[in-house]
Amino acid sequence: MRAIVCLLFTACAVFEPIDDVPSSHAVYPDTAAAIAAILAEGTPRVFAVGEFHPSKSSGTITAPITRFTDTIIQQLQPYAQDLVVETWHDDCGAASLQPQLARALQRPVATGADIAHLARESTRLSIHTRGLAISCLEHQAMRDPTGSIDFFRLLQLVTTKLHEAALDALAGSGRPGVIIYGGALHNDLYPRWPLEDLSYAAPLARELGDGAVVELDLVVPEVVAPMLAVRLEPWFPLIGLASPSRVIVWRRGPHSFVVILPAQSEEIAKIARPAAS
């Protein structure tokens, strides 16, 4: 609902936050139509897909990785033979980072099952799936003197590994494309300072040429709703359009898209709509 501000004895001014969203957006009836419109603009060599991670507080919301597995990867399959997932096999015992990571990130219990579901579906589609090659020695190097994870150092390592995995996949034969699936940080084509060094997508785009990398940020409205930092994003007012019956695509810049996936109900849209006053 629009907020209407009426001053005594003057005309009413209508404030609509969506009008102030920079760049442009489009509305589609479903996810398939939204992805088809993006693909119609050109086929990249790298699909840099990022999600806003759910947490334990997200409850029973269908995770973005499940939305990707069930409704998006099939559309990308004709253009990509490899899928790189931002995860890694960890049998490092006491050196393992996973227990502390799980606590710090408040990962839902279902995360492992969601990744396994994606791996099974990509195998069914004849897409070769891999994680990141992170050694136990590298695990140990990610700890600070207190034994805690140095998260910035870890993010730098993950960025390097994603970049290397993408180039390795592109060097293979067959369909030339690769899908990279991870968080909505490393896939930024237009990273903000001081996060430039945490993007694999920006340097890949420079190395591979214009249009070779497409950024897709997947937004589940109910997942981002509690995230206060996300409310500073220029596209956040578009959550006010969220609905089970539509998908909103916001264009950040050339080859960069935020895809606001269907909401579970109309109620979530209210968080981005100012109350009438």
Image (cartoon, rainbow, N blue to C red):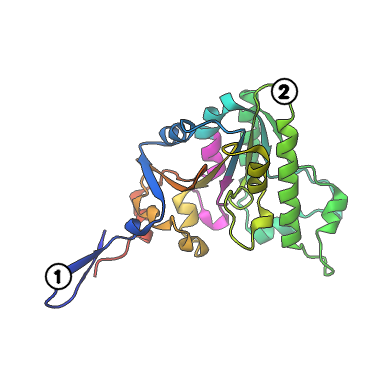
Name the residue that disc number 2 marks.
173
Indicate the position of residue 150 as horizontal and vertical percent values.
76, 63
Q: Is residue 16 magenta?
A: no
Quadrant location of residue 204?
Answer: top right
Q: Residue furthest right?
A: 137
Indicate the position of residue 80 as horizontal and vertical percent values.
62, 28
Name the residue type under label 2. Ser
Indicate the position of residue 99 as horizontal and vertical percent values.
74, 56
Relative to 128, is 235 on the left or the right? left
Q: Give the class, few, some or many, for how many residues have Cα within 10 Å of label 1's Cα (few <14, many ≥20).
A: few
Name the residue type under label 1. Ala
Instruction: Specify start and end residues of the magenta stretch as a single range.
Output: 50-69
Residue drawn at 64 percent across, 63 percent down:
194
Give the number of the disc on residue 11. 1
Relative to 218, is 120 on the left or the right? right
Q: Is residue 54 magenta?
A: yes
